[in-house]
Image: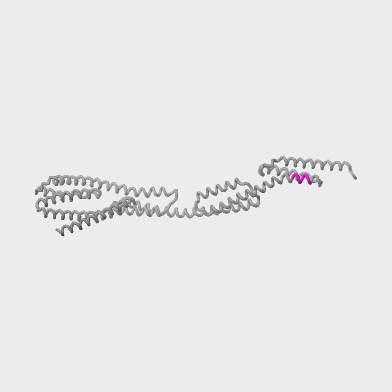
Amino acid sequence: MYNEYDDELEVFDMEDTIEQKQALVEEAKKIPEDASWNEVFHQISDLKRKWKRIPYGESAFEESLEQEFDACLDTFYAKRNEGYQNNQQLKQELVDRAVKLSTSTDWNATSDEMNELMQQWKATGSAGKDSDDALWDAFQAARQTFYDRKREDWENRKVKFEEARSTKQDLIQEAQALKNSEDWKETSEQYRNLMERWKQAGNAGREHDDRLWNEFQEHRQVFYDKREQYYASVRSEQDEKYEQKKGLIAKAKGIVEGKEYTKEHTSTMKNLQVEWKTIGSCGKDKEDQAWQEFRSLMDAYFAGLKEFNDQKHAQWRQKMLDARARKLELIQTQKRQIKYMENEMVGLLGERAIEEMEDQIADKEDFIKELEEQLADIEKTLQGN
């Protein structure tokens, strides 16, 4: 049966539907055009849900409303798509950077960079679900490659740390066995060898290296302290001998300056030479200087004695012979000093000390050449007279 009330109800419902859709269109128009997709995402989603809940009356007017509604939203979907493209580019750059870093061996610095890339990734918006998933997989794969390599390197380093620790513990035992030695020269050489082996052993790890070094150094220091005490006592004796030799020099100098060539003075000068020999060395730094001064006084006295007893020609010849003898002795002295310094150089610890010793040896060798040239001149003069 036809019911007039039903027709009125249907017309009423269509009008209400259109009013709801017009309201949604107006609400869509009010969305600021300069708003970003992230700012309007929830609002647009809410409008679309409301639109779908409104029945469709299949009228031309409703179609025009729907077109108008979609046109309002398309502006923001275009912004979303543009944002997706920008974010896709940003994320691809992060992926490329991660791939490049994945082969790095600068573990600490690269770990910091990888963490920074992750923070940038989190701060970058969506590039669309499909792109997001693919880019994330590539990004995460590059990071995982680096961290797998870092973990492998750490495992290898732990093995090397253990090997270095074992080697250094052995060196500590060797250093301990040597610390009470009084063979100063030989043991010093052995400690130098231990130090070279210590350097070659490598790092034993932060938690062990300082402790091992302190143990190693403690044993070495025991030896070096004892060696220093020994040489300090030697230097003390040498200083005392030096003072004694200075006394002999003073006596000899007084006689020489007096220029009185008596039997008593001659006997005293000879006795001074005997006493000089019985005193012993006062150390390489002072012995040569003191000896040269003392010997020059002896030479001066006996040269004067010869000059006093002989004729002028004989005196002149003797002077030349004495000069030759002095230079020969000086050459031998220089050679002995060079040999002594070469032996001493083996026991030096510092590179600088070794270089200084080598320079001193070179100076003495040059001095010997000068003396030999002077000797040749003296021989030539003697042969001509």
Q: Is residue 293 left or right of residue 87?
A: left
The N terminus appears in which quarter of the rendering?
A: top right
Q: How is the image coloured?
A: one colour
Is residue 365 inside the magenta stretch? no
Vertical arrangement, residue 125 with respect to residue 335, above or below? above
Q: Is residue 271 left or right of residue 18?
A: left
Residue placed furthest toward the front: 384
Rendering coords of residue 188 (x, y %): 32, 52
| Along the viewing direction, whichever of 364 and 216 lies nearer the viewer | 364
Is residue 65 inside the magenta stretch? yes
Count of all numbered marks drawn on residues in the image: 0
- Residue 61 appears in which quarter of the rendering? top right
The C terminus appears in which quarter of the rendering?
A: bottom left
Residue placed furthest toward the right: 1
Highlighted range, magenta: 63-69
Q: Main secondary structure of the magenta part?
A: helix
- Residue 71 appears in which quarter of the rendering? top right
Residue placed furthest toward the bottom: 383
Rendering coords of residue 86 (x, y %): 63, 48
Rendering coords of residue 85 (x, y %): 64, 50
Residue depicted at x 81% and y 46%: 60
Rendering coords of residue 280 (x, y %): 20, 50
| Along the viewing direction, whichever of 375 and 220 lies nearer the viewer | 375
Q: Is residue 157 left or right of residue 380?
A: right
